Amino acid sequence: MEILDSHFHLYSMKKRGIDTTLPENLIGIDVGTDPYDYEDRKTLIPSSVDYSHAAGPWCTSREDYTDAEDFGSRIRDCFSKYKGTFLGEIGLDYHWMYGTKEKQIALFMEQLELANELSVPVIIHSRDADEDLVRILKSHDFKTSGIMHCFSSDRAVMEIAVERGLYISFSGNVTYPSNRSIQDAAIHTPADRLLYETDSPYLAPVPFRGKPCRPEYTQYTSAYIAELRNTDVKDLRSTAISNFKNLRSLSKGSLL
């Protein structure tokens, strides 16, 4: 069976000195954090791996840009050059708080509209921003769906995201004992909207917590989620892989 990792950062792994060799049966998304980092990323992924490419900026890099219009033009240029299957990761981060909430929201909204214009799903990052996230989710039409990546909110937020047509992807932090609200969301996420990821090189699951993370570690995360949901792990993995392929088929972007 294929190994799913719906969100990993190979370039970040390389910069940290982590081996970037990937399992040949990996399926998933290599995610960047800047509109122009693809040239540095594309040489890291072998042609044998069935991967998708996300182009776009991480929300906390936005202080580098003066306004949403400038940001949008850079992303359009990036997709014109490199295509891309997903736009992201984008979103809100009130934990690290680079720039103001107002600037993050303006740029997030601009990029959501760009995703609809480009007919590609979005990858959404959200940390400590549930109130504004929910307001934006309720007001936006996700024409080609998307992923709530590294889901770190509660069941109520999950249900709103699913209602808006999004998929919910759980990372290694779901395996941390204190994250009860994330675990509750994982239990109740509809099977046809469930994904999992590593966010490598970050957030390694138990038993690797605190160590560099690798895409194949989703085997531990998926096993933990299956245990939470009291379901067979092979069935859960098969369903999640099918979910990922269904989502990817909605994109008008390229696998590169």
Image: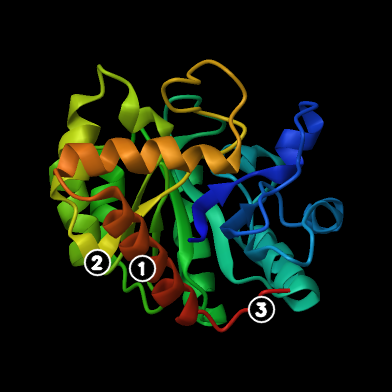
Dot 3: within a 10 Å radius of its alpha carbon, few (fewer than 14), some, or many (20 or more) residues?
Answer: some
Circle 2 is placed at which residue position?
192
- The CA distance from mark 1 to mark 3 is 18 Å
Q: Secondary structure at mark 3?
A: loop
Give the Cα separation between the discs numbered 2 and 1: 6 Å
Sequence-first tag of 2 and 3: 2
Quadrant of residue 170 in the image? Answer: top left
Residue 254 marker: 3
Q: Are marks 1 and 3 in contact (CB under 8 Å)?
A: no
Percent x, y of residue 166: 31, 64
Q: In the displayed structure, would residue 168 be above or below residue 121? A: above
The vertical placement of 237 against 252, above or below, is above
Image position, residue 171 (x, y; %): 41, 38
Give the image location of residue 77, x and y in percent: 76, 71
Horizontal arrangement in the rendering, residue 39 relative to residue 253 (left or right)? right
Disc 1 marks a residue whose amino acid type is Asn
Q: Residue furthest bottom?
A: 252
